[in-house]
Amino acid sequence: MSDNSTYFVHDGLTMIPFFHFTAGDRLLFDAWQPTTGGAIAGACIGAFFFAVFERWVHAVSPAVIHYLVQRRSRSVIKPSRDHTSSPQPSYEGSDVSIKEKRHLPPRTSPPFIVGIDVPRGMIYAFQRLLGFILMLAIMTFQAGYILSIIAGLGLGEMLFGRAAYRVVKDNR
C-alpha cells in the first residue's frame, strides 16, 4: 500500500479514514453493510433511536439505584428494646455489641452491599456497552451515522436528561 492512498485495505476490507457519505461501510457486523441510499437512511434512523435509548438508560439508572438503596434501607434491622435486661437497645442479628461498635473507627466509604452494588455495576457495564456501540458506529467515519447519533443524543438528553438531574439533585 502506498503512503498517498486514501483507503486502508486489510483482508479485502476497505476503510475510508475521513468523513464521508459514501455507501459500503460495515456497521458493527460484517452482515450490516448498507450499500443503498435507503439502507443507509435506515441505518441512520436506527442509530438515532439507539442514541435516544442510550440517553434514556443514562437517565433511568440513578432512579433504579435510588430505588435499590431505598428498598435496602427499609429492610435494615431496626433497633428494638429489650425490656427485661437493660434499657440499652439490642440489635437483632448482630454479633457485635454496642460497646464494641463505639470503639470501631468511623467508616470512610460505604459498605459493599450485594443487593445494591452488583446491580449498580451491571447497570454501569450496560451503559458503557451502549456507549462503545455508539463509538464503533462513529468510527466508521460515515457522516450520516455521526450526525444521526449526535441528533439522537441531543434529543435524548432533552427528553430524559432532566429526570437524571432531578434524582441526583433530590438526593443531596
Image: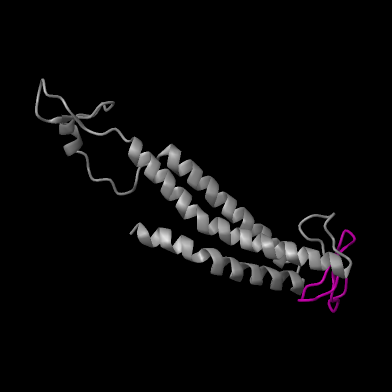
Relative to 170, is 93 above or below?
above
Instruction: Give residue 82's quadrant in the image.
Output: top left
Q: Position of residue 160 (x, y in %)?
A: 53, 63
* Number of numbered callouts drawn: 0
- The one nearer the camera, 87 or 128, is 87
Instruction: Give residue 112's quadrant in the image.
Output: top left
- Say if the magenta span includes residue 163: no
Relative to 145, is 68 above or below?
above
Q: Which residue corresponds to the image point at 62% horizontal and 53% vertical from the top-left?
A: 129
Relative to 60, is 39 above or below?
below
Q: Which residue corresponds to the image point at 53% horizontal and 51% vertical from the top-left?
A: 124
Name the main secondary structure of what is drawn in magenta.
loop
Q: Is residue 161 left or right of residue 49?
A: left
- Say if the magenta span includes residue 21: yes
Instruction: Give residue 84's quadrant in the image.
Output: top left
- The one nearer the camera, 74 or 54, is 74
Q: Position of residue 126 (x, y in %)?
A: 59, 50
Please give the range of residues in magenta: 1-24
Q: Which residue corresponds to the image point at 15% horizontal and 32% vertical from the top-left?
A: 99
Q: Residue furthest front?
A: 159
Q: Which residue corresponds to the image point at 79% horizontal and 55% vertical from the top-left?
A: 29
